Image (tube, rainbow, N blue to C red):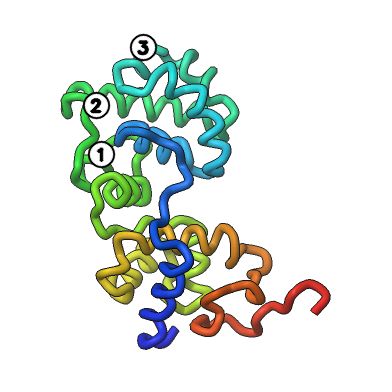
Amino acid sequence: MKTEDIEPFFATLKAANPQPASELEYSSVFELLTAVLLSAQATDAGVNKATRRLFPVANTPAKILALGYEGLCEHIKTIGLYRNKAKHLLDTCRILLERHGAEVPRTREELEALPGVGRKTANVVLNVAFGEPTMAVDTHIFRVSNRTGLAPGKNPLEVELELLRRVPAHYLPDAHHWLILHGRYVCVARKPLCWKCQVAKYCDFEPKTAPPGG
């Protein structure tokens, strides 16, 4: 993607969705951290279905720990890899209580030290909860960045660093939401919906896909 096309690319996405938000449901920073931790290799819709059962019962580190392993598994068993995620979440809750006064830390280093929290999860929490201009590269952002030519890279870290370099600063706080939603609903994995894409003219992907029957 040409450098001069990046500004109108994001301006178009912003005009269509001025205040993008995560599709995960949460009402506190801890609930957000929990939801993102549970979302690895799972859909946001699937996580929301589980947390609607979990959060009314347990939405603090102490309450999650009080459930115990089997009790927590019972609430999240509809999510893929739920047994490993339950172990990570319980261990994370212990660390939050022992080292952070039950509060979610605000630095990348402290977040990534929590079990089950990698760079992507830390970036989501830093961006969504604390407003930092981070870029959480999931499969959607990785695909959109490479397919459009916005920020090509061989791995998520390469794409993340290239996005931070190329995305104008005033778009960075919301950029990862726009790119995720674009990848989830328009620039989809198997066959992008180019005929309904509002930013197709700025995108390097060729040939553009035609509408069904076109």
On the image, numbered disc 3 is attached to which residue? 66
Vertical placement of 141 versus 5: above or below? Answer: above
**Is disc 2 surrounded by few (<14), some (14 to 19) or many (20+) residues within 10 Å?**
some
**Is disc 3 surrounded by few (<14), some (14 to 19) or many (20+) residues within 10 Å?**
few
| Residue drawn at 34 percent across, 72 percent down | 162
> Disc 3 to disc 1, how far (Cα)?
22 Å
**Residue 148 picture location, percent across and down:** 50, 77
| Residue drawn at 48 percent across, 13 percent down | 71
Which image quarter is the N terminus in? bottom left
Give the mark nearer the N terminus: 1 vs 2: 2
| Residue drawn at 35 percent across, 60 percent down | 174
Secondary structure beneath disc 2?
Answer: helix
**Residue 171 picture location, percent across and down:** 32, 68
**Residue 9 picture location, percent across and down:** 43, 77
On the image, numbered disc 1 is attached to which residue? 113
**Residue 66 picture location, percent across and down:** 36, 11
Residues at badges 1 and 2 in contact (C-beta under 8 Å)?
A: yes
> Disc 3 to disc 2, how far (Cα)?
14 Å
Please identify, in this view, whether the residue under mark 3 or under mark 2 is nearer the observer. Answer: 3
Residue 63: which quarter of the image?
top left
Which image quarter is the C terminus in? bottom right
* Visible residue check, residue 95: yes
